[in-house]
Every structure is written in C-alpha cells, then in structure tokens.
Amino acid sequence: MTTTFPVAPLVSASDLPGGPWLRAGEAPGDPLTGLAGETVLVRDDSISGEHRAGLWRTDPDVRSFAYAAPAGDLTLVILKGSATLTATASGATYEVRPGTTLSQPRDLALSWEVGADPLRAFWVHWRGPEAGTTGDTLFIGHIDDDGADAWEPYEWVDEDGEVWNCGQNNFLRVTGSTGSLRCGIWRNGPAPAAGDPLPVASGTGRCSGRHCAGHLIGASRGKGDETMILIDGTAHIENHDSGREVDVAADDIIGQYLGPQITWTSTAPYMRKFFVMTNADPAA
C-alpha cells in the first residue's frame, strides 16, 4: 500500500524523489492500462469505490496517441508541456497547457497531439460500483480561472446544526460516470490585497473575515475520499483520529480518506488547491 494514513503529503509534484516510473498500467493498482507513457502511483486505496492518483508523463519521442478512459473517469492537471486534444465522436478540439484542468468521462475517446515538450500531469482516476451520470463531453478549465460568477461559498451544516462557511469552490465537474465525482479549485477566499494579514483562526477553529483561516473536515461531512494538489500557500493539517500532524506546501499532493476528523489551518494569507472528491454513492 502506498498510502497508509488518512492524511499526508504523498509526494511533491515538482520534486519526485527518483520514481518509481513504470509504463502506464504496470504498477499493481494502476488503472491507466493503455495510456501512452509512464506513471507513478501515489495513491492505491480508498474507503469508497476505486479512487487512485499519481503522476503521468509522456515519452520524449511520442507525439500522438489515443485514449478513451475505458476503466473510469480520468481527471488531470497539466504540469508541463502542451497538446491539442480532439474528441473522436464530435470532432471538438481543445488546447491544453501548464495549469489546464480536465476531466475525461469514462469511454470518451480522445486523440492527443503533443507539442514540442513531453507532457507531465497530476492524475486522479475514479470508478465506482454504481452507475452515475454518463457524458460525452470533456470538462476543461484552468487553475487560474477566476470569473466573477465561477466561485460559490464552501459551506455545510455539521452534526450540531452549525453552519460552516470556509472559503470558495470553483467546480470543474460535479458528476461522475459512476458514483459521485466532484472536482475543481478551492481557495480560502479572494486573492488577498497587498498588506492583508494572515488569517487568524477563532478559538473554535471557525473561519472569519474575508479568508478562511482553518476548518474541520469531520466524519459528518460524508462526501468522500479526496486527493488534491496544493497550488498556492501552506497549511498545517491535523488528523484528530490518529494524532498525526503534517505541514504541506505548494505542489504537494495530499490524500484524505472518507471519515476521519481532520483540521486544516492556513499558514499563509492565500491558499488554493485543485481537488477531486469521490464516493461510491451517486447521491453523496
């Protein structure tokens, strides 16, 4: 097992320590059989359904390939390189570059034409036991998407009936071909102005002011397993069930299981992450 704890920086996407890179699909638990290039599997387990994550890179001499995500939904954040994607059925074309976020529904056939430099990406693959929402359109965005209407409050009601409002979400996708899949960008608030102070958590850990200083993700949330890559900022994460504490920074890939009580505390004025959250229950 590559992940043996409910929360940890699994690997840094900018400084992977020597591999192990294998052909896509070769590592036990790697679901990307048939995808061109090599992968590193950094998460091979989950509480609900089959949620896997890692890094992917194309070979230097490969300029074109096709992939239809036959085993499940595939979500990517492009870290290096560029490419033109074409949907086989519709003929729609898409340009990807560093920072592009895309989520490919299961069985959506795409052809890739790679630019001058090899591609490298963070990936999350999802497959659940129950049918979800089928689709034949690629979901595509960018980590810097910032339309005025794109952001919505991240809020929920806990088991005590109290409302938490902790930052904002900009969703790329809110359905999965199987089960439940949500992915997009979370931030602790609008981009701070020059001189904005570091957010300070209240005694209860609740958010206050323009930016979320920290929040509890508890078992009552029940939303699913989550893997994310931190884009900006730093944070301290505490797992109250295991007692483990870790510090994370930009480019860390972080995995959380469904269930444990976890607190995030921002240690920078501004924090953003791209996340993928899944659950075997389509209604989650």
Image: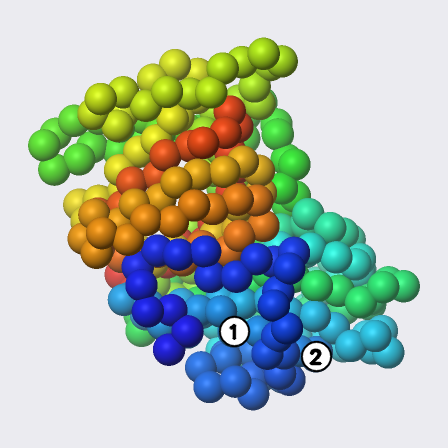
**Quadrant hosting residue 94:** bottom right
Q: Residue 58 at x, y = what percent? A: 74, 73
Q: In the rendered image, which residue does mark 1 sit on?
A: 41
Label 2, residues with CA under 10 Å away: few <14, some 14-19, many ≥20 = many
Q: Which mark is residue 59?
A: none
Q: What residue is drawn where x is 44% and y is 38%?
A: 235
**Quadrant hosting residue 17:** bottom right
Q: What residue is drawn where x is 27% and y is 25%?
A: 206
Q: What residue is drawn where x is 47% and y is 20%?
A: 198
Q: Which mark is residue 36?
A: 2
Q: Nearer the viewer, residue 167 or 260?
A: 260
**In this rendering, would 229 be left or right of 221?**
right
- Looking at the image, is 39 positioned above or below residue 226? below
* Amino acid at circle 2: Ala
Distance from disc 1 to disc 2, alpha carbons, whole Å, reads: 15 Å
**Number of numbered discs on residues:** 2
Q: Residue 148 at x, y = what percent? A: 58, 22
Query: Can residue 124 be seen here?
Result: no
Query: Can residue 196 be seen here?
Result: yes
The image quadrant where one finds the N terminus is bottom left
